[in-house]
Image: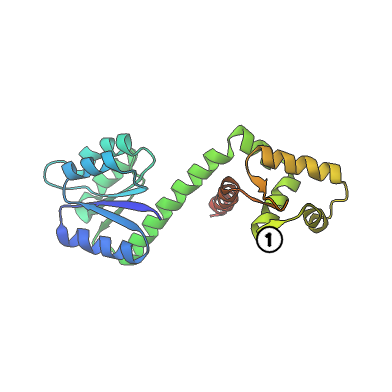
Amino acid sequence: MSRILIVDDDVDMQENIAEILAIEGFSVTTAGNGEEALDLLGETEFDLVLLDLIMPGLGGMDLLPSVKRLNPRAQIIMITAFSTVENAVKAMQRGANDYIAKPFKIDDLLVAVRKCLEEARFQSCKKMLDMDDTFGSLSHAIRRQILLLLKQAGRARFMEITRKLEIEDHTKMNFHLKVLKDAGLIKQNPHKLYQLTREGERVIECLNAVVKGLSG
């Protein structure tokens, strides 16, 4: 579940956004000013920060560097009035990922939030897949096919994998399975059934995310 921090001194706006995002299944935390936001950012890692541009005391532009420092992986969406869109664009040039202008439609808010979270997921997955061990284990089509088969089947025996992938050379199959095991992407249970590890599950999710990101 993605964690979202809403920073806005307008209580009604803050509560409305929080309710919308909570209904959509996000974990939502709110802050009424910049100082409160800094305390929360120092304690919790958020996936996304919705940051009001104009607030008493520390405004969104002032908070931006601290958000990037305390939660470097967090996506940032600036909330701005029509009259301050130019400033929101400046904030994006300084590291914010997107902005929404008041008044906004619920659908526009959700599209912006999901887009930013998807982009963060894509970048995180791309970084993980670029790691030498993971990249090496995925470099051969047969190994990718094994992972996809185990994702669909849940568990499978050696002969079942060779039959479904139509690979008659058992030595070759043993080699590819060993590469995946050494990379920590698959394992065998006490009944000698092959299955994905938690890391293997993440790799499959990341492959799907990267493909979606490249085609989006």
Q: Dot 1: what SS?
A: helix
Instruction: Tell me the quarter of the picture where residue 90 sits.
Output: top left
Reply above or below: 129 against 85.
Answer: above
Q: Nearer the viewer, residue 194 or 13?
A: 194
Q: Nearer the viewer, residue 177 or 208?
A: 177
State whether residue 94 appears in this view: no
Q: Is residue 192 visible?
A: yes
Asked if residue 17 is positioned above or below residue 38 in the image, the reply reads below
Number of residues whose C-alpha sits closer than 10 Å to that of mark 1, classed few (under 14), some (14–19) or many (20 or more): few
Query: Could you tell me residue 138's position as x and y percent?
Result: 67, 42
In which quadrant of the rendered image does the N terminus lie?
Answer: bottom left
At a point 36% along the width and 59% down the height, the residue shown is 26
Name the residue at the right extreme: 168
- The answer to whether 155 appears left or right of 15 in the picture is right
List x then y, in percent, for residue 101: 26, 56
Residue 140: x, y in percent?
A: 73, 42
Give x and y (percent) for residue 179. Answer: 71, 38
151 horizontally vs 3: left or right? right
Mark 1 sits on what residue?
A: 153
Render colour scheme: rainbow
Q: Residue furthest left?
A: 56
Type of residue at label 1? Ala
Residue at 34 percent across and 49 percent down: it is 48
